[in-house]
Amino acid sequence: MKILIIDKIDNYLKNKLLQNNCDFTENLSDSKEQILKKFNFDGLILRSRFNIDFDFIKKAKNLKFIARYGSGMEHIDTKSAEKYNITCINCPEGNKDAVAEHAIGLILCLFNKINISNHQIKTGIWNRENNRGLELMNKTIGVIGYGNTGQSLCEKLKGFNCNIIVYDKYKKNYGNEFIREVSMDEIFNHSNILSIHIPLNKETGNMINKSFLNKFKKAIFIINTSRGQIINTNDLIYFLKNQRILGAGLDVLEYEENSFDKINSKNDNMIFLKKSDNVLLTPHIAGLTFESRKRLSEILANKILDFIKSIK
């Protein structure tokens, strides 16, 4: 089994492959076109360096699996892969806890104005009353998406004594004593906070737009640790300006490059977000912890090895 690795991955994964007699090559610099010219591999491991589209899949004659070091699969044409009998593998379990904890961190920071008061003190301002915060207890958190990360977030929110309501279009009967399975109408009617945990695809791109946000009965806080293109930034800013959105915690942004390594930060919308005290921005790091790096490697390695065993 010959495997090509085109992104930086943890050494644990590489060592695990070596221990199981997998022959791998690393190519972290060649373009997609250059890689295709000499492609003779059975497996491909990547993060987000470039899209694996129909053309790539059609030309990669020997390819048997594509393994995504992470959760999101929007960079991979999974339908074409299925057509050519190529198995797609990812590991959303690996960083679910990291992302969930980051989402809670964004909520607490916004509620308690930690970023604002920290900046003020460092510039010589001691202002207690204007930095009075909110408590998470008894607030209603609307969670969209009850996959790995959505479930982890709900589990971690239990101890805050808040009301957790969840909508998932593709799941049923997951409610329990701590969370309530609801319709989107109930998310719109009751949420104080909206936290987004869905993949980016044709259905969810630009989903959080003016029409969507206009349905909320209360002014809300919004947290996005999924993908930036799910939120229409123009519409988000409109609701921030009109105080229909009280604050936003954004680990992902519409203006990131496909690789997530760079962002176009000079447009007017980014300038507004960077200047807004009630907007928290982090550089797509919710899933990047030391613990998740190892966990992602362990899970993906095991899934790859299981796949190899299954076709022998």
Image (cartoon, rainbow, N blue to C red):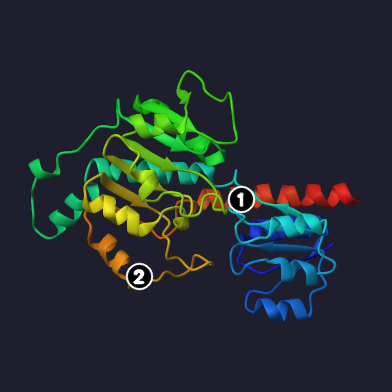
- Residue 146 shown left or right of residue 81 in the figure: left
> Foreground: 240 or 137?
240
**Amino acid under disc 2:** Ser
Mark 1 element type: helix
- Asked if residue 101 lies left or right of residue 4, the reply is left
Q: Which amino acid does the dot numbered 1 rest on?
A: Leu
Residue position for label 2: 265
Direction from residue 6 to residue 125 in the image, left or right: left
Badge 1 crowding class, 10 Å Cα cut-off, few under 14, some 14 to 19, many 20 or more, is many
Q: Is residue 157 left or right of residue 273?
A: right
Residue 239 horizontal/vertical position (percent): 27, 50
The vertical placement of 175 against 97, above or below, is above
Using the rendered image of the protein, determine whether residue 157 is visible from the camera's viewpoint: no
Residue 296 got which mark? 1
Residue name at image x 29 percent, y 32 percent: 136
**Residue 157, position in %: x, y?**
41, 31
User: Which residue is depicted at the point 53% across and 67% down?
Assistant: 259
Quadrant position of residue 269: bottom left
User: From what the image shows, is residue 277 above or below residue 177?
Assistant: below
Toward the viewer: 89 or 287? 89
